[in-house]
Amino acid sequence: MKLNRAKISTLESITVGNCTIVLTLDTRYKAVGDKYKVAMKYTVNGTRFYFHLGDKCTTLEFDAICKADGRGRAGNKSQNYVDRCRFKDIFNNHSNIIRDLANKGLIKSIDNIKAVFNGKISSYDSDGTLRVGETFLSVWNDCIADKKASTSDTYRNARDSFLRSGVYKDKNGFAVDVNMIREWIEFMKEQNYSQTTIGMYLRACRVAFKECINRGFLREVDYPFGAFSPDKIKIPVGSSRKTEFLTVEQWTTLYNFFIDGKYPRTVKSPQLIRQSLGTLLCQYLCNGCNMYDLALLRYGDYYKMSNGKAFHFFRHKTTDHSENGSEVIAPITPPFQRILDMIAAPSKIGELVFPFLLGEGYDPDGTLARNKIHQENKNLADRMAKISTILNWDVNPTGTYARHSFATNLAQREIPIDYISFAMGHSTGNRGQITKRYISPYPLEKQMEYNSYLLDTQEMSDLHRQPAVEISNDELIKLFKDRFGNLP
C-alpha cells in the first residue's frame, strides 16, 4: 500500500539561501518493523539529499518525538523529549554549517552538501551501480591542469606519491583529514624523500585543499595545515642552501675571466663556455634572477624610458601565486652592460635580450619551454664545471649560486634587507604597493649604488660617486597606468 507522505511529521525545517533543510524520516526505503531512517533532508534547486542520523522510527514513534514538549508524567526526562532535544541539536549544528556555506556563496548544487556531510559525491545508476562524482583527487587533477608545465610536474609527482602511499582511494571522496596526511608524510620519510621534496609535495596538496574549500566541497575547519596549531600539519622547510654562494672576490674573478676570454687550447667549444659564463654572470647581476626569467627578458618600455639603464620584469616562478607576479627592476651596471654587449641580442624594444636561451614561439608555461630551460641549466652547469677546473676551484657554480650570492653579498655589505627583498621580487603587494615600487623607496640611482657592491671593479666603485640616469615620477606613473590602468 502506498504511504501517505502528507502524514510524515517534520521536527524542524528552515530555508537558507537556495537550500531547504528538514529533519524528518527518509521514507524512500522501509526498514524492518515498518521503521524508517531519521534523516536531514536537503533540497537544492529541486534535487534532494538525505543524510541519515543513525536512528530508526516508525511514523507514529517519530510523530511522538516531534510532539514531545517536556511536560506530562515523565516531563523533560521522557525518552521522546530527550530524543527531540538531541535531534534539534543536530539540526542546529547542520543549519549553522549550511549558513556558513551560503554566506560564502559555496552552495552551487546538492553536490556541495553531499561533499561536506557525506565526504563524497555519489549516486546510483538505474542498475544499482555506484557512480562517483567529483573527489579530492579530481580537484587535485584540475589544479595540475591549471598550472604551467614546470609547476604541474611537481603537483603531478605529489599526487602520484599521495596515491602510492595507499592512504587514499577514490571511494574516500573528500574524506581527507589530518591523520591521512600524516600517514602520507610517514610514507615519504620511509621512502627517503628529502625535507625539501616533502615540503614541495605538501604545498601542492595544500593548493588542492584550498581549491576544494573554494568549491564548497570542504569546510575551512577541515583544512589540515597550520604552522602554530598542534592539531594541524606544519609544512617543513627544505634544507638551507646558504653555503651555495660565491664571494664578491670569486664573482670578480669570473667576470675578469669572462672579459679576458682566454682559454687553454685543450678546451673544446670555448665560445659556448664563455656564453654560459656570461649567462651566469647576468643572472647574478640581474638581481639574482633565474634562467627562466633571463630567457623571457625583453627590451621593454622601462628599458627605453630609463635610457637603457634598467630592466623591468615579473618573476615567472611566481605567476601562479599572485595576480601580477613578483616585480623586479634590475639596474644595468657597467659590467652588466659589457656582458650584454658581448652575448645579448642588439637592443630593440619588444625583442628578447637572450634569444639563444629560449627564442620566440614557445609557450612560456609549456612543456617544450620547460625542457629547453632545463637543458640550458644543465649546459651551464657542465660548462661552469670546466671553468672551475681551469681556475682550480673546488666549487662548481650554478644558477642557484647566482641568486644566493646576490642576497648574501649585499647583506654582508650591510645593504638594507628591504632593498634586497625588493630587488629579488620577494615583496609583492596590492596595486598601491606596486606603484610605490616604481617611484620609491629605491630610485634607480640608489639601486645602481647598491648593486655596485656585487663586483670589486673600478667601474663599480665609480658608481658610488656618479649618479645614474633616473626616470621621472610622472613617467613612472604613466608606465604603471599603461600596464595596470587607473588606481582605484
Image (spheres, rainbow, N blue to C red):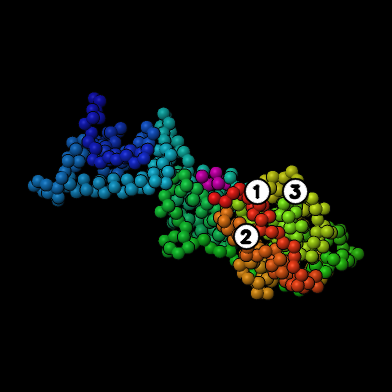
- Report the side of 108 relative to 85 (left or right): right
Front residue of this view, candidates 79 and 84: 84
Question: Could you tell me which secondary element the residue under label 2 belongs to?
Answer: helix
Q: Which span is picked out in magenta?
A: 139-144
Q: Which class describes the residues within 10 Å of circle 1: few (<14), some (14-19), or many (20+)?
A: few
Instruction: Give the residue displayed 89% in from the left and 64% down from the top.
Output: 266
Residue 464: x, y in percent? Answer: 74, 72
Residue 143 in the magenta stretch? The answer is: yes
Residue 318: x, y in percent? Answer: 61, 54
Residue 95: x, y in percent? Answer: 32, 45
- Report the side of 52 relative to 150 (left or right): left
Q: Give the labeled residue for mark 2.
A: 437
The vertical placement of 226 against 162, above or below, is below
The vertical placement of 249 against 96, above or below, is below
Front residue of this view, candidates 187 and 313: 313
Q: Quadrant of the N terminus?
A: top left
Instruction: Give the residue displayed 70% in from the left and 63% down from the top.
Output: 444
Question: Could you tell me which secondary element the residue under label 3 belongs to?
Answer: loop
* C-alpha separation, residue under disc 1 versus residue under disc 2: 16 Å
For the residue marked with disc 1, what is the amino acid?
Asp
Tell me the tag on residue 350. Answer: 3
Q: Give the mark nearer the N terminus: 1 vs 2.
A: 2
Question: Is residue 220 visible to the viewer in this orientation of the structure?
Answer: yes
In the rendered image, the residue lying farthest to the left is 73
For the residue marked with disc 2, what is the amino acid?
Arg
* C-alpha separation, residue under disc 1 versus residue under disc 3: 15 Å
Instruction: Give the residue displayed 22% in from the left and 36% down from the top.
Output: 9
Q: Give the labeled residue for mark 1.
A: 482
